[in-house]
Image (cartoon, grey):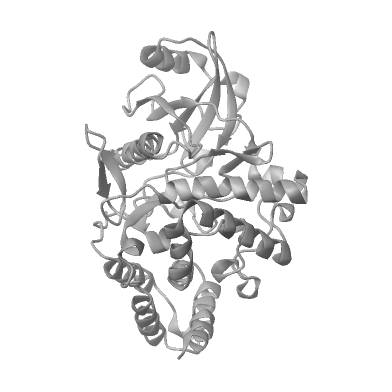
Amino acid sequence: MSSLDINKLPFYVPHSVAPSTYNPSRPGYKQEDVDMQPLNEAVYNLLGREVVHAMLLGWGFFNVVYELEMRTGPPLVIRIQWNFKADPISSSWAVKKISREVAILELLQRVSPQVPAPRVHASDFALNNSVGAPFMIMNRLYGEGQWMAWPKLSADERITFVKSLVTSFVGIFNVCLPSIGSLETLTPDGLPIIGSILPHMTLLPIEPCATLEQYITLQLDHAFAHTHDQALYDFSLPDLFDRIRTLGISMIPRDDPAMLVPVLVHMDLNNQNIMVKNATVSGIVDWEIHSSLPACLGARYPDFIRYDATYDPKYGLQPRLMPTKECWPLKDEAATLRNVFREAASALSSDFVRALDKGAILRQLLELVSCSTVSEKGMQALFRWEQETTQRTAP
């Protein structure tokens, strides 16, 4: 998400001018001024429980999250869509966005409960509800963000944490879906219905893909359609994309049908969306950006222990500084932790490990193609990676 610019997304307004009373970045915001009555009314109408206090937990590009202290029982969490535009198309998009996330969480709870994702207790997608925006109410997960916990973990605790992370990664990977795209909704029987690709970034929905080759072609066409100034480069952009297309299609693991089965992918599984308690994973949050992708693209190492593609320092694309440099292991430690991750994954799923290997080059290719649309540096990295990879994989 580091390349996402809220000001360029079609359905949202900048944080500072979002009109919601729950917007923590609006001028003059004070938590003590948050109106409790709408929150209390919303929760009471859905769950019959009374809210006595609300505390801001955090906010992101598209939502704000408050902890709700209840008169009786454990605290809850409310997640509110807070900065969508008021026109009908944008409002509809906000509803679809949060309803997709609710569907994902409900599917995970039923199909892969070992993944420590929030449990949805209730939701309301109406724009005229008491809160004035779509929202969902979930259980409270405890722990701290991985980026905060990591520097405090000992070497042994870091190994323990990475092993625990494998359970979640494999659990997500084990959620099979009917086609390539993103989860739109669930049928009354709980069956997934797949909808458009990249729903958070496009004005017009892109239909789900039937094959991996179609998906690769779509991603390359989308990237090449961006305005690029050929004068900035000493290589031909059309020729580069032709070679990338050929390479990508050649990397499709057609000999292994299991690698082509679409699976669930959390597309924003960074060290701010993983929660840690007692050196183990206590929560995987922020599911609004997800995809259904072939297994060979769905299996992956955690970003924080990667040193390939956009995470390779030689390309200068992902400075290992965010949110702090201390939450990123150095290269040697990262290599050790990748081995730990792989060994633990081998004990849980041979398909996952096979997908790690068979999809490695293709995942890097598509990641760098996406990055090429953001900056000149991204395009230069794609060119350099293609040259190096072609030489390395040549017979």
* Horizontal and vertical percent position of residue 292: 35, 53
Image position of 14 (left or right of 174) = right
Q: Residue at x 41, y 44 (%)?
A: 12
Camera sees residue 128 = yes
Extreme-front residue of the structure: 347
Occupied quadrant, residue 312: bottom right
Q: Residue at x 30, y 50 (%)?
A: 177
**Which quadrant is home to the C terminus?**
bottom left
* Horizontal and vertical percent position of residue 300: 50, 59
Q: Residue at x 38, y 19 (%)?
A: 130
* Horizontal and vertical percent position of residue 150: 71, 47
* Horizontal and vertical percent position of residue 365: 45, 72
Occupied quadrant, residue 366: bottom left
Q: Is residue 225 above or below residue 152?
A: below
Q: Residue at x 40, y 64 (%)?
A: 296
- Along the line of sight, which residue is nearer the eye, 81 or 109? 109
Camera sees residue 20 = no
Image position of 145 (left or right of 191) = right
Q: Is residue 248 above or below residue 235?
A: above
- Along the line of sight, which residue is nearer the eye, 55 or 299? 299
- Along the line of sight, which residue is nearer the eye, 273 or 334? 334
Q: How many marks?
A: 0
Q: Is residue 37 above or below residue 255?
A: above
